[in-house]
Amino acid sequence: MHRLLNKSPAPTTLPTVLALLRHGKTLWNEEGRIQGRQDSPLSPAGISQVQEWARFLCNYEIHHIIASDLGRVRETVALLQKQLDKVPIEWNPALREQSWGKWEGKTFTELKDTQEEELKAEILAGWNFRPPGGESRKEVLHRALPVIQQAVQQWPGKQILIVCHEGVIKSLIYHLAERDFLPDEKKLLDKRELHLLQGMDNRLSIGALNILQTKKKMREQRS
């Protein structure tokens, strides 16, 4: 269990802990299809993933949930709530996935076959990566970061679960880690993981990354 995520936090002495969790795997995820603002239901494997996450999270006191209002996140939160005792939820459109414009619904294989040079150019643009007709990673950060900052101010010392999307989570953490969002950077985040941020006053920092994987490794070492 991670020291930053407490069973009974003392609001006056501890920072606000923000646990970032992506939605469960969807049918489009399994097909390698870009979702962006479009939606796809959770797959059977995705439902099992979320149920496992819920069993982990129910060991801790979660005071509030802030979540994207897209369908795959709503489905994820509904599954989590079955074990989290009906935590208050705020649905926030500022936490929606990055818009991928004309590339939504396509697979990366299709893009490599038909728009390889354009795709390469966008990948090398780092924070300025912008699919045609979509939004940039900078724009994702500029709409999502205030949600996190507001949560720190509104709920000091509380534990907040943020359920959203990979593009949003990466933008927040890469900003705090001062990453350039370029392909040659060392991998920082694992997929389908829980990551912690902590905030106090006007300060926001990375608490711990890839917690579920760390927990799994510890369990394997004890067995």
Image (cartoon, rainbow, N blue to C red):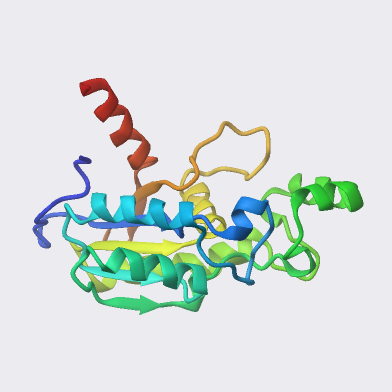
Image coordinates of residue 68 in percent, x first then y, are 46, 71
Write the residue at 11% across / 56% down: 9
Q: Is 113 or 154 nearer to us in this picture? A: 113
Image coordinates of residue 104 in percent, x first then y, are 73, 65
| Above or below, comparing residue 150 to residue 174 in the picture | below
| Above or below, comparing residue 208 to residue 66 in the picture | above
Write the residue at 61% across / 51% down: 30
Write the residue at 25% across / 52% down: 55
> Quadrant of residue 220 in the image?
top left
Horizontally, residue 184 falls left or right of residue 91, namely right
**Residue 121 in sight from this viewpoint:** no
Horizontally, residue 178 falls left or right of residue 33, namely left
In the rendered image, the residue lying farthest to the front is 44
Q: Is 118 or 181 nearer to us in this picture? A: 118
Image coordinates of residue 46 in percent, x first then y, are 46, 55
**Residue 203 in sight from this viewpoint:** yes
Write the residue at 59% across / 67% down: 40
Image coordinates of residue 185 in percent, x first then y, are 61, 34
Viewport quadrant of the N terminus: top left
Horizontally, residue 187 falls left or right of residue 195, namely right
Q: How many marks?
A: 0
| Above or below, comparing residue 116 to residue 98 in the picture | above
Viewport quadrant of the C terminus: top left
